[in-house]
Amino acid sequence: MIGAGMGAMATAARLAVAGHQVTVYERGSTYGGALGRYERDGFAFDTGPGLLHLPAVYRDLFVKTGKRPLEDLVEMVQVDPAVRHVLDHATVTLPGTSRGGVAAALDETFGAGAGERWNDLLGRARDAWDAIRRPLLEEPLRPDWQVLGRDPYPALRGSGLLRRRQPTLAEVARRELGGGLGELLRGRVLAYGLDPDSAPAAAAALPYMEQTFGTWYVRGGMRELATAVYERCLERKVEFVFGAPVRAVLSRDGRAAGVRLEDGTEAAADSVVCGIDPRQLPAGSVSWPRGSVQARGGSVPGRLTLLLALRGGRPADAVHRTLVHSPGSAAVQLVTVLRPDDPSTRPDADHEAVTVSAVCGPAGGAAVPDPEKLLDLAARAVPDLRKRLLWQEVRTPGHVEAATGALGGSVPAPALPGDGGRLLYPANATGLPGLYLAGGWAHPGGGLAHAGMTGALVAGLIVEGADFRGSQ
């Protein structure tokens, strides 16, 4: 196993339960991949994903790999309100999984009928979700993946887009919602690192997923989830070797036969699972879907993140997640502000730990925005932010690259259908028999839940072979 990220560890635990002897080689000094933790002066911050969607993926992992369920090992809480949007001329706070509550909040902010339009759109997004859930989350990438290049989002009659071409998410937002309501949809997709002006309409399935299955946080920080998975691996006798970069995948008789470490050591294996950015493997090792961003050499965006230590306690009206919209800014269109109500993140009740992040170009690519711009936008969500600021830690895509190895510090988004397959990822089984891909850079793409799902897919392919048809 190459890498100790969440997808790799999920694969390792499942394979160990199936009777395989598993060794994980990790270039860094710890496990968890992007799920890092930064601590200073009694403050603590998640340095990667701060929230979890589709928690059933990890619940299933723990059910299938041991006796103790996930909830016995970590305290998972549903975030409610789910999100607050701060627009140029309006602020709206949306509850968790209550369709009626969301509709009422939208009607109050944007006028009568806004909630109905939003729920109608999510109804169409549900149809897209139902069409893509199996092939894009629970099954290996199908050999005829080209059929996934068609967008399953149902066209709205009278939209002017019927059958003429596939609309973008931005066009759907403008035609089916309009105004500030449409900006909410754009922002929810922007937060995943997707460009609404080019993303397919099926990207509306992402906010549908959030509203349907909820948004979750792990007490003590999301790093606790990584620790729980790591400890489950240890229980299943998975061996970890840290400080051991893999430099090559060995092959013999036309199939993967092990790995070569940086120090020249060779480790034989019946199968090799790559849980890191496969672009780090030798050229030609992995076949990307034709036309995909990665296949064309396009860049995948990263994140600029500010870890803020604030004086003063967390106000009672604060929400866990706020999206601050800035559609008029070419540099920063959206800022995500996370304010967890978690004593473990702060030295005492008279202080607060806040994380601010924005999508930006990868290291070595487009210019990284000025952190001061992020602070200006975050101040719209956190009153008196600059007066309260004790210190800040800036983490650029370069820091992410150094910590995780992902080229340019890029952060992959979930796979999506449509647009000719541009947003698909390589299949979990590669062209080299015995070499498999897990984690956010493989089908079904990025995000904690999607990366975790690669564990079920890769383990199924190794245990059951090419006849494996997906998770049940």
Image (spheres, rainbow, N blue to C red):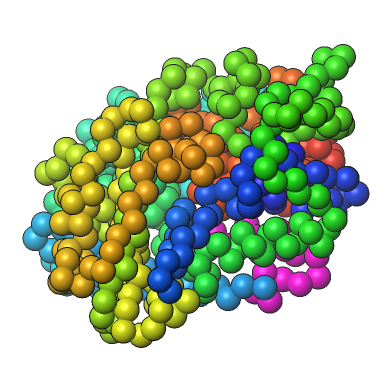
Up-down relation of residue 67 to residue 351 (above or below):
above
In this view, which residue lies farthest toward the left? 89
Q: Position of residue 356 (x, y in %)?
A: 31, 58
- From which residue to which does the magenta span run? 52-72
Q: Report the front residue among 87 and 339.
A: 339
x 43%, y 32%: residue: 408
Residue 311 in magenta? no
Prevailing secondary structure class for the magenta stretch in the rendered image: helix
Report the front residue among 311 and 406.
311
Specify whether residue 138 is in view. no
| x 70%, y 23%: residue | 248
Quadrant where the N terminus lies?
top right
Numbered disc total = 0
Q: For this view, does 88 lie left or right of residue 199?
A: left
User: Does residue 304 show up?
Assistant: yes
Residue at image position (61%, 44%) is 28
Q: Is residue 62 magenta?
A: yes
Q: Residue at x 67, y 69 (%)?
A: 70
Q: Taking 36 as reference, is 351 left or right?
A: left
Indicate the position of residue 8 as horizontal and vertical percent values: 68, 45
Give the side of residue 82 with respect to residue 62, left or right.
left
Instruction: Residue 127 in the image: state x and y as whole percent.
Output: 46, 48
Residue 23: name its quadrant. top right
Q: Nearer the viewer, residue 279 or 168?
A: 279
